[in-house]
Amino acid sequence: MDDTPLLEMNAVSKKFTSKSSELEILNQADLCINKGETMAVVGASGIGKSTLLNIIGTLDKPDSGSLMYKGQDLFSYGDEKLAGFRNRKIGFVFQFHYLLQGFTAFENVLLPGLIAGKSKKTIEKYAANMLERVELGSRFDHRVEELSGGEQQRVAIARALVMNPDILLADEPTGNLDQKNSDSVHRLLLDLNQELGMTIIVVTHNAKLADMMNRKVTLKEGRIIPA
């Protein structure tokens, strides 16, 4: 049996500097994440939760340290190879859905597969299945601006999952939703974790969502610790 973690951060450091100050976000931080695990990153605003998520998602690079995926150092990849990995293996959901206005729900969900060079027929099937799964089967042809906030976030989740990634990263996924829609998205995330065995990492201020995860971590003095 292979006990290699799905993701492993080793001695990762990251700081931001300006002419007048230096802000240390991570200092020799370590973290192991296993396949199928759910984890919440919690804590006060400004401690670096989103920066941590961006490094895990390879959107940002650390100053030092490594990020291993199944034993391979992701930051040893060139930019093109890393972008390909990110497109295939990681799905992103943000507080602001970043859907393309003027396009339908279906067209928005298709995009990652088309960018990856998948056949149109194949990705159309995946996109249709995923929209059905997030309970938007009747909204395929509705343009983004015709959807409610909760529906738009569900489209964003479907788009993040259309490539069947190993990891879903969500940054305040219900931050702009009312309680009813938030609860619906929370249930959906947990159902997807159970059905697909997908690893889910969320940055959230929502205590209810955080408590649904297998574990919670926060940042303190640049280290990742249990919350």
Image: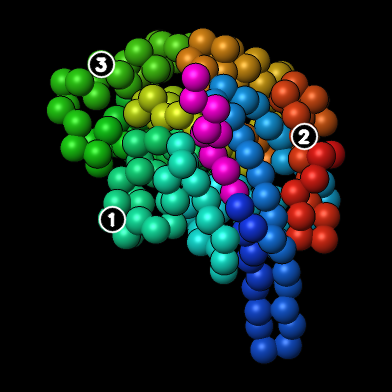
User: Which residue position is annotated with label 1?
Assistant: 80
Residue 1 appears left or right of 10? left
Q: Name the amino acid, label 2.
A: Lys
Mark before the other along the chain sequence, 2 or 3: 3
Instruction: Say which of 7 and 85 sits in front.
Output: 7
Classify mark 1: helix, strand or loop: helix
Q: Which mark is residue 125?
A: 3
Residue 4 on the magenta span: yes
Check the image and report above or below for 198 versus 216: above
Residue 227 appears left or right of 23? right
The answer to whether residue 70 shows anywhere in this view is: yes
Q: Residues within 10 Å of mark 2 (few under 14, many from 20)?
A: many
Residue 23 appears left or right of 167? right
Q: Name the amino acid, label 3.
A: Lys
Q: Name the amino acid, label 1.
A: Glu
Dots 1, 2 in contact, CB < 8 A: no
Residue positioned most to the bottom: 19
Classify mark 2: helix, strand or loop: strand
Mark before the other along the chain sequence, 1 or 2: 1
Locate residue 87, reporting x and y percent: 35, 41
Residues in magenta, as a range: 1-9
- Give the spatial CA distance, label 1 vs label 3: 27 Å
Check the image and report above or below for 181 versus 93: above
